Amino acid sequence: MILDEVLSFILKNIKSPPKQETVSVKELCGRILANSLKSNLSIPPFDNSQVDGYAVNSEHFVMNVPITVSQRITAGSNPFELEHSSAARIFTGAPIPRNSDAVVMQEDVEILNEKVLFKSRIYSGQNVRKKGADLRENQIFFHKGRLLSAADVGMCASVGLKEFQVFEKLKIGVFSSGDELKQPGEKLSAGQIYDSNRPMILSLVKSLGLKTLDMGCLPDDLVQTTQLLYEASKKVDIILTCGGVSVGEEDHIKDAVEKLGSIKLWKIKIKPGKPFAFGFIGKTAFMGMPGNPVSAWVTFALLCRPFIIKSAGGSHFSPQPLTIESDFEWNKSNDRQEFLRGKVNNDGKLELFNNQNSQILSSICFSEGLIEIPIKTFVSKGDKLNYYPFSMIA
């Protein structure tokens, strides 16, 4: 299976969405809406000035003729109707008085004996923010399943909504695996390495605003691994593991999951990421990522992340690539769909990081996206390829 096929398969295995809860606007960022939101007023709710200046009626305007300033309007005030052939001193955000339709910036007027003189022509609507320019009353502005950003929270607050129905946060448990792993700060012995995968995957999950549980490191022992996975399945909604799902003698995770539940998918035609596994332990979903750090990162970004977002109630979960011209050649035909690390160069074309080994985590750190190479495909300069910016997938 290639990416689209794997995604389709695992997403079909998602059960019902999480339960709902009510939160305040202060708790809203990073949450997923459980229902659509409708504006109960227009934003802005009235025509207002977008600059400090003078409100006028463009039809009564005469250039280079001083006119009287009939009132002063500040933000939050309630102005009276503009007198004929006069101007109103007005400030940013203040409501436009009736009988006016334009605002002239204060820098573009001249003050003469407490009157104002306009030195250039004025048009209707000049420097006026119209009622409903941002949102219309009764407009649905966010749909169910939206993962809310800080700007989204501002929009929700702008319409005066106080409480919101959101999906409860899923609990995601993350394991690494392997007796060779030590934790940062511990002393390394011969043959040991520091565990980079678990902190990395925990951070990726946290960026989704979900509850993360650091489940520790699974040992190279089938009995212990089986017990630890069983215990985790009672605590979390989704289990993520790194390493231990390949075909080595010390790769016990797949066997442990099969003892406890089922493996529904194993080995995919994606590079890096071939030894990816998916299944269930009871009602708890299991996703086993490869142990090489780039493979773990890529399979999380392209497979685990969409599955987690949809499981959490999100509606925007499948990665959508851009199509960009290649500035490199690739002569390594492969029987797997490849995802190379690279970026868009100054010419607006795709270029590769200089080392594509799946153990080289710097290929993620110093790249800006994944470049898709279809199965059995050679690439020439100028060929159009799918590009997944990291900002869209991680």
Image (cartoon, helix red, strand yellow):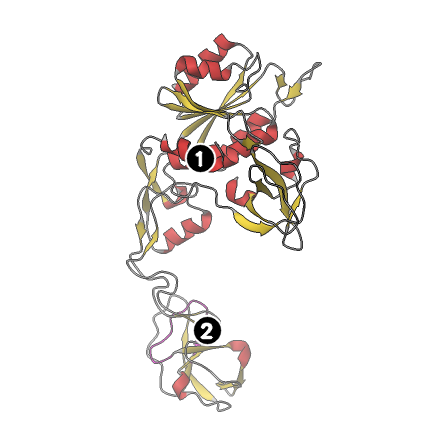
Say whether disc 1 or disc 2 marks the residue closer to the N-terminus: 1
Q: Is residue 338 above or below residue 182?
A: below
The number of numbered badges drawn on the structure is 2
- Residue 12 is left or right of residue 319, and the answer is left
Rendering coords of residue 352 (x, y %): 66, 43
The magenta-colored residue range is 88-100
Secondary structure under tag 2 reads loop
Is the residue marked by circle 2 packed among few (<14), some (14-19), or many (20+) residues within 10 Å? many
Tell me the tag on residue 104: none
What type is the residue that disc 1 sits on?
Glu
Name the chief secondary structure element in magenta.
loop
Rendering coords of residue 114 (x, y %): 49, 85
Q: Residue at x 44, y 35 (%)?
A: 5
Residue highlighted by disc 2: 127
| Mark pair 1, 2: CA separation | 52 Å
Q: Is residue 77 above or below residue 259?
A: below
Q: Nearer the viewer, residue 392 or 36?
A: 392
What type is the residue that disc 2 sits on?
Asn
Residue highlighted by disc 1: 5
